[in-house]
Image (cartoon, rainbow, N blue to C red):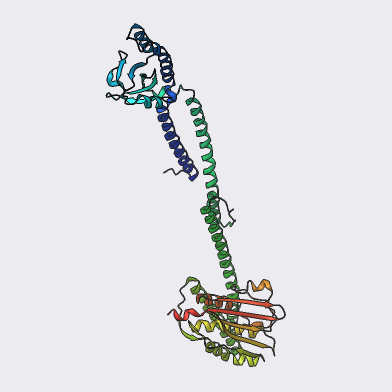
Amino acid sequence: MYSSSINTRLWLTYTLIIFIVLTLASAGIIFAFQRSPLLYRQIFLRMDLVSNLLTDRLAFVIDSDWDPTIQLFFKEAELLDVQVAIVDNSGTLLFHTIDYREDQIPKIYDPYETADRSNDRALVYRDPEKEDWFYQISQINENYFLLVAARRPDVAIQSLFQDELVKPLLRTGLFALIGAFVLSWFMAEWITRPLRNISESAQNIAVGKYETIPIEGPMEVQQLAHAMNDMSQKVEKSLKSQRDLVANVSHEFKTPLTSIQGFSQAIYDGMVHDEKDVKHASEVILNETNRLNVLVNDLLTLAKLDAGTMAMTKEDVELNRLVQTIIDRFYYEFEKSNLKVNTDYTDEIMLYADAVRLAQVFSNLLDNAIKFSKPGSEIGVTVSRHENQALVTVFDAGPGISEEECGRIFERFYQVDKSRPGGEGRGVGLGLAISKQVVEAHGGEITVSSKVGEGSTFMVKLPIEDATNK
């Protein structure tokens, strides 16, 4: 089935509307001209001529008997296709031309008033046969009035086109119609051009090309272009994230799998004989297996958070107590790294949250602080309240993070300079990404501020009002 373009449909729609409007306007003009006095000006001229001529002539003979002279005057009026009648000052009909029947003559009750009304325009009278007559009255003398009348003819539509006023109107209408067709085409093009750009952009996205759509056209089309640009950026970012994920996962899996394969092969081939070597090989295999297990669990956690299927077991949680519990878990790590922890708590803060997931967030932050802090330095942990938000900050006196890295630190698998302290104990770059997802799942926000050489501060904001939404 043939499907026309929106451009063609718009143009045809505009054209149809314009054609209908011009047709209705033309019909109105024709109807108005049919009723217009301009079409009857020759009749009015004849009526004026007869009225002026006979009024002057009759003024000399009207008081005498009706004689052939008056009959002759009326004959002349009939030659001009005009009917005449004479009434007295009371409106009584005294005389009329032979072809002018009495039922075609309007009743004149006040000749003076009627004469005033017909002074600047012709009056209209409809006889019993539904025929319209133009008439006017002029005063002959104080006692008599002359009534001049002419039948209003039916004007054929084709005769209107012979009028000198109609022809220019028709030419103007034709030019307006042609101009309107051209204008409607440009209007359709103006509306559909940005839509075509959006269509082309959608096709480009399908083949992997992500180009920004120009913002133009009507407001709704601009909104659609904005939405398409946002979608394009998100799709591009998502695909890049997927590619990075595959590359990073492959890289992170490759090292432990290589170690596991190598030591397993050595044991299988009998190259490891004494108990010490076997124990070392088994220890490496176990450590690398645990590392893979942590990586797989982290990836599953992220996948569930992305899909919104992560089950959050929310309950009443006292934030100060939860944070202190996490700090206590890292007691030996603090001792081992010769680090001091300074805490600052506020009044009791109750949240309605998943304590296990929040504990995972704070554990990640403390673990990173320990890894990147210099021995003998201090780590600060504060819990405070600002209006309807609970704030937890963890800051260290480590080497700090550059501004560029701060913008990417919550990306998956992204790691700050791998040469920094931590060595083999460093993670794979999923901890902060998971923390960000967990905090946002609670309706909160996690941010970082840092300065190279002066340390870093991570802040977690959690809405306290969640405690009432059980």
Give the residue furthest to the top. 68
Q: Is residue 259 left or right of residue 106?
A: right
Residue positioned 41% across, 26% down in the render = 116
Residue positioned 47% across, 41% down in the render = 14
The quadrant where residue 445 appears = bottom right
The N terminus sits in image quarter: top left
Q: How many marks?
A: 0
Q: Residue 27: where, in percent of width, then height?
A: 41, 32
Q: Is residue 267 visible?
A: no
Q: Is residue 266 left or right of residue 112?
A: right
Q: Please determine whether, in this image, residue 12 is positioned above or below residue 51.
A: below
Q: Nearer the viewer, residue 323 or 414?
A: 323
Q: Is residue 318 visible?
A: yes
Q: Nearer the viewer, residue 394 or 240?
A: 394
Q: Residue 423: where, in percent of width, then height?
A: 67, 82
Residue positioned 40% across, 20% down in the render = 138
Q: Residue 151: where, in percent of width, then height?
A: 35, 20
Q: Residue 285: where, in percent of width, then height?
A: 57, 84
Q: Nearer the viewer, residue 341 or 463?
A: 463
The quadrant where residue 102 appears = top left
Q: Nearer the viewer, residue 228 or 73?
A: 73
Q: Please determine whether, in this image, residue 31 is positioned above or below residue 197.
A: above
Q: Please determine whether, in this image, residue 187 is positioned above or below residue 216.
A: above
The C terminus sits in image quarter: bottom left
